[in-house]
Every structure is written in C-alpha cells, then in structure tokens.
Amino acid sequence: MTARGRAFWIGAAVAVGLAALVAGTVNYEYFFYAAYIPLTFVVLATAWNILGGYAGYVNFGTAAFFGLGAYTAVVLFKSLEAPLAVQILAAATMSGLLGFGAGLLTLRLRGIFFAIATVAVIVIMETVFINWRYVGGATGVQLLRPAPIAPFTSYIKMLFVLMVLMAVVAVAVARYIETSWIGRGLRAIRDSEEAAEASGVPTLKLKVFACTVSGALMGAAGAPMPMYLSFIEPASTFNLNYSIGALASSMIGGTAHWLGPVIGALLLSSLQQIVTVTISNEVNVLVVGVLLVVFVVAAPDGILGLFARLRRRATARGTR
Amino acid sequence: MSDMLLRVAGVSKHFGGFTALDQVSVEVRRGERFGLIGPNGSGKTTLINCVSGTLQNDGGTIEFEGREISRLPAYRRTRLGIARSFQIPRPFGSMSVHENLVVPLEYVAHRGSLHTADTWREAAEILRRIGLADKADTPSNRLTQVELRKLELARAMAARPRLLISDEAMAGLSPAEVDEILAILLQLNESGITIIMIEHIMHAVMRFSQRVICLDAGRIVCEGTPAEVVKNADVQRAYLGA
Amino acid sequence: MFSFDLLLEAILFGILLGCFYAAVSIGLSVAFGLLDVPHVAHPAVMVFGAYCTYLLARYGWDPIVAGLVLMPFFFLLGMVIYRFYYEAFEKRGTEAGVRGLAFFFGLALIIEVGLILGFGVDQRMVEARYIGRSLALAEMRIPMRMLVAFGVAVALTAALTLYFSHTFTGRAIKAVAQDEPALRLLGANPVRIKQWAFGIATAVTALSGAMLIIVGPVEPGLDRIYIGRTFAVVVLAGLGSMTGTVAAGLILGISESIVLMQFGASWAPAVAFGLLLIVLGLRPQGLFGR
C-alpha cells in the first residue's frame, strides 16, 4: 500500500474509533440526533460525486435512490422484522438496481436529459409509494424501534456509529474509484466524452457502473432513516432537498477529490441546521440556492479548489 | 493476411433532410498512405466519423480487416485497431499531458493489466517520440495549438492502432510545424501503420499520400494518385466552384 | 365502470389542457430546444410570472392584460439572465455544461424560496369574468377559463410560429440554432441573437404565467411538477420544433386527463414524468426532432 493509502486507512480507523469513544462517553442524546443528518449527507454527497463530479453527469434524483432505500428497509422490517444490517444490504441492492436501470435508459443521452430524467424517477417513485397502502400510502406509517444491538444501550447512539461507518465505507469506495483506472476513465468522459470513446473507453458501461454504485450507496444511506424518525411517509422521504443537498455539498466542497463532498456536506448540513433553527426553513433553502449559484459561478472547483489556489499562490510567493 | 484493411461500401449518412454522404465506397490497403481531400462541408469528417464510430452510418457496410463494424460502438472499434485524431483538438483538460496518453493505453493496450508503471513508462516513451516529453506534466488545457495537435496524434498512437486517421492535424500551423507533423506521420507509416490523412494543405497531402480521393457534396468525384487527382477537372471545379 | 361520455369529456378537456401545456412549453422550446440552454429554471420563472400577474390582478387588472403588460419586462429579464449565463458559462467551454445546469437549478431554488418568503406557501388565485363559469356543450360542461387559456395558447403559438418563419430576426434565431459558425461568417453576432431569443422566450413565459394562474391556483412549489410537463412536451416534440410542441402538448394533455379520470389525482403527476422517461428511452429525438 502507498503512503497515502496507509494515511487514509489510519485516518478512517481514527474516525471510527473516535465515534465509538464519543458514543461511549457523551450522554447528551440530542447531539447524536443532530449529528446523524450531516453524516447522512456525507454519504449522499460522496455517492453523488461518483457520477456527478467524476463523470460530470448531474443527477437530480438522489431523493429517489435514498427514498427507495428507506422504503425497502420499511418493507423488510414490517414483513420479516429483518435486522438493520439486512435492511441496509437490501436497500443498497434495490437502489443499485434502480441506478443500473435508470442509467441504462438515460445515460446514452446528453447530460441535461439525464438530469431531467432523474427528476422523473423521483416523482414516479414517490407516486408509486403514495399509492401503496402496505407502507402507509400518502399518510405514512409509524415504526417501533427494536432494541439496540449490544454493546449499544441507546438506539440513536447505535445509528450514529453506524452512519460514521457508512460514511467511511462510502468515502473508501469513492476514493478507490477515483484513484483507479475507472476514475481516470470517468474523468476522460467528463473532459471529452467523444475523445474518451475514441480512446477506447467504454463510456456507457462506465457511466452505468458509476450510476449503479452511486445509487447503491444512496440507498444504503436511506435504510436507517425510518428507524431514525420512527416514521416514514412519501413526501418528506422523496423530498427534493436530499437531491439539492447532495448536489450542493459536492459542488461547494469540490468535485475533483473525495474530500470535497465530505467537507461540503459537513459544512452545508451544519449551516442548514443552524439557519433552520435560528431563522426559518425557507431561508435555509434560500441560503443553499445562493451558495450554490455563487460557488458555481465564482469558485467552480469548490472549497478544495480555493485552498489549492491559495497554496499555489503561497508557494509562488515563496520561490520568488 | 488480406491486403485490404478497410472497405467502405455504399455508405450514406443523412442529417434530417441533408445528405452528408451519398453511397460512398472506398478501399484502403494495408500499409497505405491515403489522402482524403475535398472542400468544406463535402463530408470528409462525416466519413471518418462513420468509420471510427463517432457517428452511425445510415446505409452501406464498413469492413475492417474483413469484419463488419458498422454496428460496433466507437470504443470497440478503437480496440480493434482504428484510431483517429480530432479536427478541433479535444484534450482531457483536467489531466496532464502524460496522463492523457495513459487513458488510451489503459483502455486498449494494457487492459486488464495491473502493471501501471509499465503503462506510464510507455506513455512517456510516446511523448519522447513525438517531441512532447518536456511538457509531460503540463496540464493539457495549457498547450499551444501545435502541441495540442501533437497530443491528439500521440493519443491516437497510444491506442496502438493498425489504422490511424488524422483529421486536419495541420490546419493553421506554420510551414515548419507542418513538416514536424508530416515527419511524425511518415514515421508511423514506416512502422507499419496505415494512415488516412484529411488535409486542406495541398502540398502536404500530395507529398504524403500514395493514393488520394476527393469528396464533394458527399460523393467521391475523383480517385487516383496525387498527380492524377490534382489535374482532374472535377476536383478543380469542386474547390474553385463552377 | 367505463363511460363513453366521461371519456369524451376527458378527451375534450385534455385537448384544452394540452394546448395550454403546449403554450407554456414554447418558452422552453426556444430556450432549450433552439438555444441549447439547460434552462431548468424555466418553470420557476413562469410561476414567478403567475405571481406577478396575481399582484397586478389585485389592483383590478384582468390577468391576460396583466400578462401582456409584463411581457416587455420579462423580455429584459430574459436578456439579462442569458447574458449572465453566457459570460459565466457558455463562453468558457464544455466543462460549463454541468455547472450551467447547476446554476439554473440554484436559480430555480432561489426563485421558489423567494416566492415563499414573499407570498407564503398558501395557494393564490385570481378572479375574472371567465373564471368559475362553465360553458355547457351537449352533455358536457367545459370550464370557461380553460377555453380562454386555449384561445390565448393558440394565438401565442400562431404568433411565434409566424415570427420565426417570416421575420428577419426570427429566421436568424432559427439559423443560429442550426449553424452558428455559418451565421458568424455572414456577419451576424450570434450572442446578440441568442440573447434576443432568450428574451423572447422569457417574455412568452410571462404570458404563460398569466395563463397558469387563470387555469388554476398557484403555489411556489408548482414549478416542480411543471419541470416534468414542460420538458416532457419539449422532448416529445423534438428539439427545435415549434409545431411539434402543439402535438406533444396534446398528447400529454389527453393522457393526463384520461389518467385523472380513470385513476384519480394521485397518479396524475406521474403521467408527465412517465411520458418523459418513455420518450427518452425509446425515441430521444422526439416526434419531429432535428
């Protein structure tokens, strides 16, 4: 393993260890409730970036994959009382299949058609679940949490640590793709799809692969959500805000590197929570919209890009 | 092994009501230096787009090494041995010059190989042969025009082609730069690569090609040696107008 | 049970609805179909137009008149938006595709939230002589407001079609959509032409917004369902085809109306998006596409 690889895995182990430590020592339950959301967006943004950032195919449909994952978990919980781990795997599988199918259907087309098609997928998914009474239809259904798995004594602490683990897994997957020949192929597609194809890159296959992996991760992130809320209903589950959050986090953080979505999600999600609590939910969405436009226009490489620029200017000044 | 590398038979291409190619048939022999000329809009780039797979032809057949390829996607054709450069260079702008070459190497020649060091080394070798070695680490979106053209050719070379199609690689270059590109293409041909050259710079095409065809309004108006084609009345009419 | 009378009424309503959908999609047909701008904020601008109409209607203006009066202002707005988009994105090359899309997405968001902050989430409607009354035709009752929207839609479509085929600037716009380099060689400035075209598209959107609030109440989140409807119409029509927009609108309108009749309102939103996916999957160039 390279030095960078070792550093990454050490960092990942530290993160998980820290999470476990916090779960073991902190007893302020609200912290874990609050921290769950930014962690969810770390997974969503990292997953989004695999197709949106690396390959350049903007996906508005994050909410569809997320929601399908959540509802898959609910169906398994209601019918089989399946454990959370099984729910997550099933959710990842279902959303991965959705990513595969939707990708195959729409990734032959130009970027904007794909983007609009992903909005279509959200609406269709939402409509299906509104009309399915087993999972509560439009009004939704309440869910009773089972006991937390040992050694956890609090369910929400367990969800917190689970989410940290999921975030690490998502980032590891994204990092592997980014640094491998797959990532290079995706970047070639983003830079010039025709030239990539002429260079032997199987563009459709790679795009569908990225869409499948991306969808699977988003579905996995959705699976614990019904347990987190003890409730599920279509409108808030398939809410476009999940799509907006994933997209904005990646574009604001920086799409070229796996660290971008992580930074973007943590910052944006925290900012959103603060604004929602202190001002209003509407202003929160406004803030996201404005930030997105500002970054897309003025800082297209995101926060990571800004740092890179500053570093370059500092070294240039240093060598003078 | 057959002498015929590429056989285009009755290929047509329409864009809505506009016919870009009208029943074009041409054969290219293995190892040949083949020139393709014609005024703007005559269908030259459309023809090679159909051969390389960037576009799908509407009628006719395209055979490469005896195999019908018109249903294959472009990347498959590249893996079979057809490479092309683009008229307007399309570098992978986010990558360095070196990395630009690693892409075709990874996806064509070194597919499935885990020895990435070999791939980067071969890319560096190609850069040296084409004269871009000192620009290896430069971001490819910061190159000059002639460097971009060289990169286009280098990327096509990295796909280890048996047929290389060069689409107006010399447009807008100085005479010295034209000679540079011409020398590279001749070198490639000497190593066994069949080359189709689309060019407007007449003296380059005539010096380079063994056989030339002239397209006008989607049809072949003349085929023969450079000397024959240059003297042909239809060709002169196509370029200078009636 | 299946009723032939109900089906006929649904189809008739669908025709009116379809022409309405066609009319509200024309702005997008120009902005995206002809000019290739990834204008996902188009429905949001239309909803903004509806709210502006609402404001004017509060002072006693007839909604259609309000819409017409708003058109020159929206024209200018459109030119400004395009200029900004061009300077920030299109000029900078192909990488801009993704970011341009994100920009319009952000713009749509800002407009939507702006409307919520300004007007609240409640539905707003306007009143006019033709709203609330129905025309009795044989055994069917046709809402007057639908007929009015239908009339405006037909007039608008006809006017634009004539504009693009018979005026100099109109034809220049069609030319720039087909062959920009050639246009440049002829001495025309493609950026100015595109800017003008985008202005027209946005001006049309003002009138579309007026029709929107005539046809039914509006709320800030309405743009989300209309992304599906307008893009379904534009894609089904085929990019750049104005007559196709009418045909596509009719198909959407009638499908939605029949689904509404048979399966109820909870399935209706899926029709537009479902149609969009089917078109994208089977025949992405649409019915009359280039």
Image (spheres, rainbow, N blue to C red):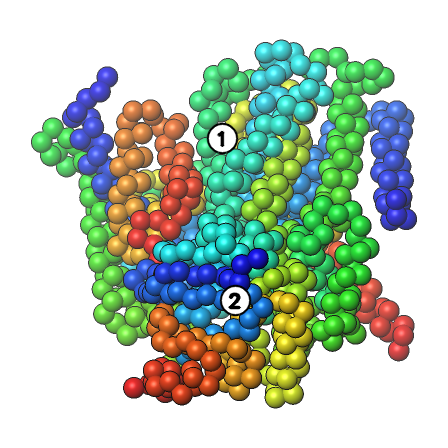
| In the depicted structure, whether residue C231 falls above or below residue B94 | above
Q: How far across and down, in percent of the image, does residue C151 sit?
A: 20, 50
Neighbourhood count class around disc 1 (C-alpha, 10 Å): few under 14, some 14–19, many 20 upward: some
| In the depicted structure, whether residue A110 falls above or below residue B239 | above
Q: Name the residue under label 1.
A: A125
What element does badge 2 sit on?
A: strand
Task: Answer with left or right where residue B174 lies relative to residue A160.
Answer: left
Q: How far across and down, in percent of the image, does residue B118 sit?
A: 80, 56
* Quarter of the rendering containing residue B15: bottom left
| In the depicted structure, whether residue C207 falls above or below residue C113 | below
The residue at 38%/77% (across/down) is B222
Q: Which chain carries label 1?
A: A
Q: What residue type is labelled 2?
A: Arg
What element does badge 1 sit on?
A: helix
Q: Mark 2 points at which residue?
A: B29
The residue at 29%/59% (across/down) is C68
> Split into 4 quadrants, where in the image is the C terminus of chain B?
bottom left
Q: How far across and down, in percent of the image, does residue B84 sit?
A: 57, 65
